[in-house]
Image (cartoon, helix red, strand yellow):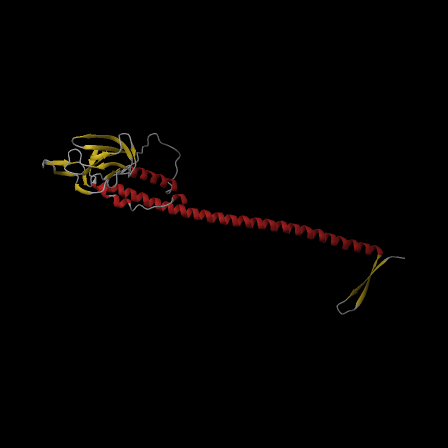
């Protein structure tokens, strides 16, 4: 007796229709169904695993993209800070140069084509490093320029020709006389080194300070010296007390400025103090 696979197929209208498969055919059909199910399961697992891998890759890419956006934003913020600092540096540099120009001091750099070389490159725009070096150069120059009054008081005699206060004869006055209280503090108007000190009949107690390689300042008729030859002084440091020593008619400070070994009018250096107080300030450490 042959084995048969008996199946009944019901239509949409409820009518049934019998379907018979012989034994060998039934085995083939079951095998086909089995392989289809197994293939479906394997395919589903394969594509599911592939889908999960793609999702992990997409998640990783999204994370990297977010990190990249955050880094780009930080770079933009830092660039904005650098641009702001560069603007401030330019302002400071221009202001310092204008102050030095007012007193007749030019910032110069010695350049030469001898002993120079290197690869040719197109000119670059101002860099933060270049502006920082320029600012350092300006600050170094300003630190060695005697700016502001060395003592409190009233200007009693200016630089230039005048009648000598003792013999009333025409004479050249090579400095600025500042009348003040006896014992008034006298301060260094710039960083420097005391190059000479002493006492004589003309100058009384005196001090000479060398500021860098181009400026020297002198202070005559002191009551007392508080620094000696070889001492290093800083701007604002008290170096002596006002007095009436030497060839003098009363308590005052005779103040001289020499630029490249020639006397210059100290008044323009004293009056520049108003410009110094306008120097802008910026915290570069935050840049």
Q: Is residue 77 above or below residue 186?
A: below
Q: Is residue 26 above or below residue 96?
A: below
Q: Nearer the viewer, residue 58 or 263?
A: 263
The image shows residue 130 at horizontal and vertical percentages of 37, 40
Q: Nearer the viewer, residue 110 or 197?
A: 197
Q: Quadrant of residue 195?
A: top left
Residue at 77% from the left image edge and 54% from the top image edge? 34
The image shows residue 188 at horizontal and vertical percentages of 26, 37
Residue at 20% from the left image edge and 32% from the top image edge? 205
Q: Is residue 92 above or below residue 191?
A: below
Residue at the far right in the pictured view = 1
Q: Is residue 128 left or right of residue 179?
A: right
Q: Nearer the viewer, residue 190 or 130?
A: 190
Q: Is residue 99 left or right of residue 68?
A: left
Q: Is residue 126 left or right of residue 209?
A: right
The image shows residue 31 at horizontal and vertical percentages of 79, 53
Which quadrant of the rendered structure holds the N terminus?
Answer: bottom right
The image shows residue 168 at horizontal and vertical percentages of 9, 37
Residue at 47% from the left image edge and 48% from the top image edge? 72
Q: Nearer the viewer, residue 224 or 196?
A: 224
């Amino acid at each position: 007796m042959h084995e048969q696979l008996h199946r009944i197929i019901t239509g949409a209208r409820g009518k049934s229709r019998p379907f018979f498969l012989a034994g060998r055919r039934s085995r083939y059909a079951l095998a086909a169904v089995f392989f289809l199910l197994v293939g479906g399961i394997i395919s589903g697992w394969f594509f599911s695993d592939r889908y999960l891998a793609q999702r992990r890759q997409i998640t990783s890419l999204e994370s990297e993209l977010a990190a990249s956006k955050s880094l780009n934003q930080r770079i933009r913020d830092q660039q904005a800070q650098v641009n702001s600092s560069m603007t401030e540096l330019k302002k400071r540099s221009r202001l310092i140069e204008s102050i030095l120009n007012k007193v007749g001091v030019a910032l110069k750099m010695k350049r030469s084509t001898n002993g120079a070389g290197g690869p040719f490159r197109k000119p670059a725009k101002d860099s933060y490093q270049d502006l920082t070096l320029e600012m350092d150069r300006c600050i170094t120059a300003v630190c060695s320029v005697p700016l502001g009054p060395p003592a409190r008081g009233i200007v009693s005699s200016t630089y230039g020709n005048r009648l000598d206060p003792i013999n009333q004869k025409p004479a050249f006055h090579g400095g600025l006389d500042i009348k003040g209280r006896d014992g008034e503090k006298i301060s260094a108007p710039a960083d420097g080194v005391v190059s000479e000190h002493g006492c004589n009949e003309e100058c009384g107690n005196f001090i000479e300070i060398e500021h860098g390689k181009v400026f020297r300042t002198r202070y005559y008729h002191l009551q007392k010296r508080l620094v000696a030859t070889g001492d290093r002084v800083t701007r604002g440091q008290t170096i002596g007390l006002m007095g009436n020593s030497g060839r003098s008619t009363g308590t005052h400070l005779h103040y001289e400025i020499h630029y490249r070994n020639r006397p210059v009018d100290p008044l323009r250096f004293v009056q520049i103090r108003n410009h110094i107080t306008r120097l802008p300030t910026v915290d570069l450490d935050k840049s």
